[in-house]
Each structure stands twice: as structure tokens, then as C-alpha cells.
Image (cartoon, grey):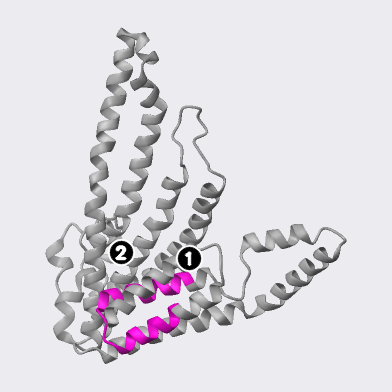
């Protein structure tokens, strides 16, 4: 039951983030209540931690006492007149401006509730606090790896589009009349090239998190390889909490607005023969950075277990204590 409620938390978080209608306050309240009840019922660690993390993301993005950008724009447009409607709009603007001072405390309270629910669930778990965190980290990492593996399939159509584009352009040298065929009107060179960079962008955005949990990103080991194992883990933990996850949140927030505006205006390619539905590729941007943020969460949990957990969990949680890109692995992995 706890796992089902954790899944419900994830669903509500997605609806809360994507909904441009309705009372956000009640959705947010329902999400937080479901999250807290799930913490009582010993849910699956990975599902629950991912749910609380996404709940925090959505709650910080949709602050219940702050009007959205669209609402404020509409109110400011309505307030330009001299009638009663303009006066009401101006009163609403002043009301929301007055509430703005409470935005930060509300966000801090929600963040503390999310962290508190996670700690409470971990302490209530049958396996114990640190094994719960480690199991959550490994479960989230397994999900991210699966997403990355599925995303790599995009490499196949991308190569096929490239090959067809090259062959088609060479064929036009022999038969220029091919441009008048139905096939060419569908697979124009412009569409093929745009499809290539769409697939290329989606491939990379959906595998950023996969690369991080597999430690495949390039590291500069000139200093790190000379540090102690605990120091390396501290650097990794601080990097996730202070830089990676906040940066992903910023990109997600602006990326979501980027994709939503593209959908609302029905954006298409700037080229006359380009691809329609530009919002699809723009939607991959916030999705990719949510996955990367989950990867950062997985790494951070492992670092916490390594730094503060029991000795017998060091082998499972100490992956980021090594210098995996160093030239002298036998020295880098020494205790």
C-alpha cells in the first residue's frame, strides 16, 4: 500500500507541474498528505524517495501562494483600463504582491516536510535507516540506467536518417526530377536534418543521468586523485546538493515554460519544409534534467551512506570514493 501511495505521489506531482488550470493549493495539499501517509506504510525505498524528490520539485515550482506568470500577465493587462474590472485586477495584483513575502518561508517549510518524510520512512523501514537509503539509491540508479538503455535506441533511426539524407542528396545529382516525387515531399533534406538533431538532442538529454550514475562523464583528476577517499565523497556530495540538483531545478523550471509556450503557440520549424510540433523536442529538455537530478539524488544518497553509515555498507556505497579516470587505479583505490 505504501508503494502505491508513493506512485500516487509521483502522479500528482506530474499533474501539479503540468496543469495550467485548477486550484494548485488543493493538489499540493493532496500530494503532501499522500506522501506523508506513504511514509507510514513502509513503501519501496526507490519509489518513495523518487516520489518525495519529485514532490519537492513540483512544490517549489508551483508555490501555492504565488500567482503564475500567465495569471500576473493577464491581471496586468486587465488593470490598464479605468473600469471596475481594472480596479479588481489591480486589487488582485496587490494581494498577490503582499503574499510574495511568504513565498520563501512556504518553500522552506515544504522542503523540510519532504526531507522529514524521507527520514521518517527510512527510520520506520524494516531494513534500517542506511540500508533504506542505499536501496533507494540503487533502485533509482537502476531506473535511470534502464531509461538510458532505452534512449540509446534513438541512435538507430538517427543513423538511418543520416544515411538516407546523404544517399538522397547524391541521387539528386543523377535525377533532379526526384524532387517532384511524393517521397521527396515527405523526406525533404530539411526535415531529415532537423530529425537528426532532434534525435541527437533527445539521445544526449535522456542519457545524461545514465552517464553520471555510471561515472562516464569526464572528470579532471589532477587534484582529486591526490585526496583521501572521504574527501572525494564529500566533494561529490556537496557538488550534488549545492550545484547539480539546484542547477537541474532551474533548467527544469525554465525548460518547462519553454516547452509549454511552444505548445501553446503551436510552434513549428522556422523552415518552410521543416518539422512541425516543435514542443516535442523542447519537452525533452525538462525531462532530461529531471532524470539527471534523480541521478544526482542517487549519488548523494550513496555518499551519505558512505560518510555516515555503518562499515559493512562501505563496499556498496563507496563507488564515488575512487578515482575512476585516474592513470594509476591501483593507487587511487587504495584505502
Tag 1: Cα neighbours inside 10 Å, few (<14), some, or many (≥20)?
A: many
Residue 273 location in percent, x, y? 46, 27
Residue 50 among magenta residues: yes
Answer with mark 1 or mark 2, whichever residue precedes in sequence: 1
What kind of secondary structure does the magenta stretch mostly adopt? helix
Residue, disc 1: 17
Residue extending farthest left = 330
- Front: mark 1 or 2: 1
Q: In this view, does 32 lie to the left or right of 138?
A: right
Residue 294: name its quadrant. Answer: bottom left
As drawn, the label of residue 223 is 2
Tell me the residue at 37%/71% (across/down): 10
Q: What stretch is highlighted in magenta?
A: 31-58
Q: In this view, does 143 lie to the left or right of 51?
A: left
Quadrant of the frame with the N terminus: bottom left
Label 1 element class: helix
Quadrant of the frame with the C terminus: bottom left
Quick check: 145 above or below 2? Answer: above
Residue 173 among magenta residues: no
As drawn, the label of residue 42 is none
Tag 2: Cα neighbours inside 10 Å, few (<14), some, or many (≥20)?
A: few
Residue 143: name its quadrant. Answer: bottom left
Residue 197 location in percent, x, y? 37, 38
Tell me the residue at 37%/65% (across/down): 293
Q: In this view, does 222 lie to the left or right of 112?
A: left
Label 2 element class: helix
Residue 204 location in percent, x, y? 33, 48
Residue 257 location in percent, x, y? 53, 56
For the residue pair 316 and 221, the one nearer the viewer reads as: 316
For the residue pair 226 and 54, the one nearer the viewer reads as: 54
Amino acid at each position: 500500500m505504501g508503494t502505491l501511495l508513493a506512485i500516487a505521489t509521483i502522479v500528482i506531482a506530474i499533474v501539479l507541474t503540468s496543469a495550467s488550470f485548477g486550484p494548485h493549493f488543493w493538489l499540493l495539499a493532496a500530494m503532501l498528505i499522500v506522501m506523508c501517509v506513504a511514509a507510514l506504510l513502509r513503501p519501496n525505498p526507490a519509489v518513495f524517495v523518487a516520489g518525495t524528490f519529485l514532490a519537492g520539485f513540483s512544490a517549489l515550482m508551483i508555490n501555492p501562494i504565488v500567482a503564475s506568470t500567465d495569471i500576473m500577465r493577464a491581471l496586468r493587462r486587465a488593470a490598464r483600463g479605468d473600469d471596475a474590472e481594472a480596479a479588481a485586477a489591480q486589487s488582485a495584483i496587490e494581494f498577490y504582491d503582499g503574499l510574495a513575502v511568504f513565498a520563501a518561508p512556504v518553500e522552506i517549510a515544504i522542503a523540510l516536510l519532504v526531507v522529514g518524510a524521507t527520514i521518517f520512512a527510512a527510520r520506520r523501514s524494516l531494513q534500517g535507516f542506511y540500508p533504506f537509503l542505499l536501496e533507494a539509491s540503487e533502485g533509482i540508479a537502476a531506473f535511470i540506467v534502464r531509461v538510458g538503455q532505452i534512449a540509446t535506441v534513438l541512435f538507430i533511426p538517427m543513423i538511418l536518417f543520416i544515411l538516407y539524407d546523404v544517399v538522397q542528396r547524391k541521387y539528386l545529382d543523377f535525377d533532379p526530377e526526384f524532387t517532384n516525387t511524393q517521397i521527396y515531399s515527405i523526406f525533404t533534406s530539411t526535415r531529415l536534418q532537423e530529425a537528426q538533431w532532434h534525435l541527437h538532442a533527445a539521445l544526449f538529454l535522456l542519457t545524461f543521468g545514465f552517464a553520471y550514475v555510471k561515472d562516464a562523464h569526464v572528470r579532471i583528476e589532477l587534484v582529486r586523485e591526490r585526496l583521501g577517499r572521504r574527501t572525494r565523497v564529500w566533494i561529490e556530495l556537496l557538488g550534488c546538493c549545492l550545484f547539480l540538483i539546484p542547477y537541474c531545478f532551474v533548467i527544469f523550471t525554465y525548460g518547462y515554460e519553454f516547452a509549454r509556450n511552444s505548445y501553446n503557440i503551436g510552434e513549428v520549424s522556422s523552415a518552410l519544409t521543416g518539422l512541425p510540433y516543435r514542443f516535442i523536442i523542447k519537452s525533452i529538455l525538462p525531462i532530461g534534467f529531471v532524470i539527471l537530478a534523480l541521478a544526482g539524488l542517487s549519488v548523494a544518497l550513496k555518499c551519505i551512506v558512505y560518510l555516515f553509515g555503518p562499515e559493512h555498507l562501505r563496499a556498496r556505497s563507496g563507488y564515488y570514493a575512487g578515482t575512476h579516470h585516474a592513470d594509476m587505479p591501483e593507487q587511487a583505490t587504495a584505502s
